[in-house]
Image: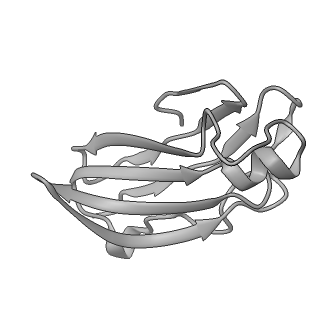
Amino acid sequence: MSGYLTTHILDTARGCPAEGIHIALYRVSGNSHKKIAEAVTNSDGRTDAPILPTESFKTGSYELIFFVGDYLRDTGQAEGEVLFLDQIPIRFGMSDPEAHYHVPLLLSPYGYSTYRGS
């Protein structure tokens, strides 16, 4: 297998990469979640290495959780104890053992989107 998974976060409200956001990756099987990786975004809004590198890659169902609450507070885009967006889960499947999967997050304080990138 030579597949791998990357991600990055763009702050669409501020028009820049989102630095310092904690990300967790889980492998999902039925109702079971197993954390398999964690990373923090760098100044380019990316992780320093693939969040799921080739040597650990397996096809299946996964979930990325983006912990955006502190970032939104720190950048002055949100305040208070309860935020509209605090943690963003994105569940997706990877079926091609040879593919590069890229799951970006386009973030603003009151909305987000994602897609399969390249």
21 or 6, which is in the foreground? Answer: 21
Q: Decide: is 113 above or below 100.
A: above
Q: Quadrant of residue 11?
A: top right
The residue shown at (34%, 61%) is: 26
The residue shown at (65%, 62%) is: 47
Q: Farthest residue to the left: give it.
A: 30
The residue shown at (82%, 26%) is: 13
Left or right: residue 4 compared with residue 21? left
Q: Quadrant of residue 79?
A: top right
Left or right: residue 23 compared with residue 30? right
Left or right: residue 36 compared with residue 1? right
Q: Quadrant of residue 80?
A: top right
Q: Farthest residue to the front: give it.
A: 81
Q: Please provide percent x and percent y for residue 84.
A: 61, 32
Q: Please provide percent x and percent y for residue 33.
A: 24, 62
**The C terminus sits in image quarter:** top right
83 or 20, which is in the foreground? Answer: 83
Q: Decide: is 27 above or below 108.
A: below
4 or 114, which is in the foreground? Answer: 114
Q: Please provide percent x and percent y for residue 49.
A: 61, 68
Number of marks in picture? 0
Which coloring applies here?
Answer: one colour
Q: Please provide percent x and percent y for residue 54.
A: 39, 68
**The N terminus sits in image quarter:** bottom left
The residue shown at (77%, 62%) is: 42
Q: Decide: is 69 above or below 33.
A: above
